[in-house]
Amino acid sequence: MSAMRRRWQSFWDRSPRQLKVQRDGRVILLIALASGFAAINTGNNLLFLGWGMVLAAIVISGVLSESTLRILKLKVVPPDLGRAQETVSLGLQLKNESTQSPAFATRYSVRLKHAQGESLIHGPFRLRVEAKASLDLHARFVPSARGLYDIEYVEARTAYPFGFFEKIRRFEKKQNHSFWVGPARLPVTDLTTSIYTRLGYSPAGSPGNGDEFFSLRDFRQGEDPRGIHWRASARRGKPLVREHEAMAGNKVLLQLETTGSNTDALENDLALFCSVAESLLERGMSVGILAPGVFIAPASGPRQATLFLMACASLTWGNSLPSYRLSPDTAHLVLGHRETGLESGAAFVPMDSLEAVAS
């Protein structure tokens, strides 16, 4: 692209108003040129009248379309977090600031910039927006990959009233709008069931509803007398209740072992890795993750799933594994394509089996 063309493209992208000629507009422009040429060469007053009417229609079209766009106010509300290969909704807050005039035949769009380039997300079409009306609209799209998505601008466009031209108004971005998109969600239910069954349960170190003996304590008023340990109570001279030890699910740290430099393969491995971690969380386990530049200690709950997605969405390939420390009750599973350099106590899960389940 030449320097002149780049400057023109930069000016065009920054302009607050843009105009696109529609098919009917090209026809009306040809009619205007033909009738004007004929009127000038022949001096026929009837041709001058027709030429004036055509030019008046073009001017009226521009005035009415501008009056429709000028009274609108449009803001975009980005989502907190999206997922690749799933529908993401961008909120649009539309307001007609006029007290009398409605807006006609308007469509709304959002321009996004991301690592794969730029894309224009088309939103809804509204035939009429009443005066002083406020609407909550949505522009939906399906991101193809994870990463950071920046909102360049939001725009309103209309071809009102004749459809000759489409006028576009870009609204100034007053603050930095961006959002993260996490890896795609893949079906790994069978694999996580296998991991969950293999890990099983371990003593929690606290009283609960388990089967193993934990301690004896004093009998409390209102408790079921059938829980009294009569032999110990006879020796102590007071009623004692036998408590059992609670059983807790094992904690697990999932480690992503990366090999090769094929970006598509690495992204697929990351999607599988994140899906396994989420699936284990949904089963109530305490899960942590270890990946290039990322370490999140084992925990449970919805907040942990959000941390996983944010970390995987912003992960950069090439970073080294951060230092970490595990408690003795935490299992260490390494997900990768080949078993190399495993630490003591870490179990290896082939990524090939993951891919077979996901496919």
Image (spheres, rainbow, N blue to C red):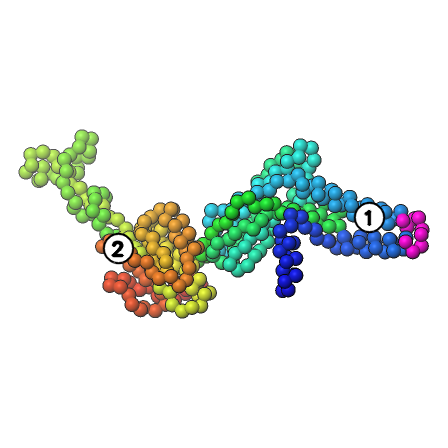
Residue 273 position by quadrant: bottom left
The outermost residue toward the top is: 221
**Of the numbered discs in the image, which one, if any, rests on residue 55?**
1
Q: Residues within 10 Å of mark 1 (few under 14, many from 20)?
A: some
In the picture, which quadrant includes the C terminus?
Answer: bottom left
What segment is highlighted magenta in the picture?
A: 40-48
Dot 1: what SS?
helix
Q: Is-magenta flag for residue 45?
A: yes
Left-right relation of 87 to 16:
left
Identify whether 28 is placed above or below 236: below
Is there any visible trace of residue 328 in the rendered image? yes
* Distance of label 2 from label 1 (alpha carbons): 78 Å
Which residue is denoted by mark 2 in the rendering?
326
- Looking at the image, which is closer to me, 21 or 217? 21
Q: Is-magenta flag for residue 352?
A: no
Residue 33 is situated, as x and y percent measured from the top left of the image, at 83, 55
**Of the numbered discs in the image, which one, if any, rests on residue 225?**
none
In the picture, which quadrant includes the N terminus?
Answer: bottom right
**Hey, what amino acid is under mark 1?**
Leu
Residue 132 is situated, as x and y percent measured from the top left of the image, at 64, 34
Left-right relation of 298 to 310:
left
- Looking at the image, which is closer to me, 215 or 327? 327
**Hey, what amino acid is under mark 2?**
Leu
Left-right relation of 132 to 200:
right
Residue 272 position by quadrant: bottom left
Circle nearer the viewer, 2 or 1:
1
Give me the residue at 33% from left, 48% from top.
300
Residue 326 is situated, as x and y percent measured from the top left of the image, at 26, 55
Our reading of the magenta stretch's main secondary structure is helix
Give me the residue at 40% from left, 69% from top.
260
Q: Residues within 10 Å of mark 2 (few under 14, many from 20)?
A: few
Looking at the image, tell me whether mark 2 or mark 1 is earlier in sequence order.
1
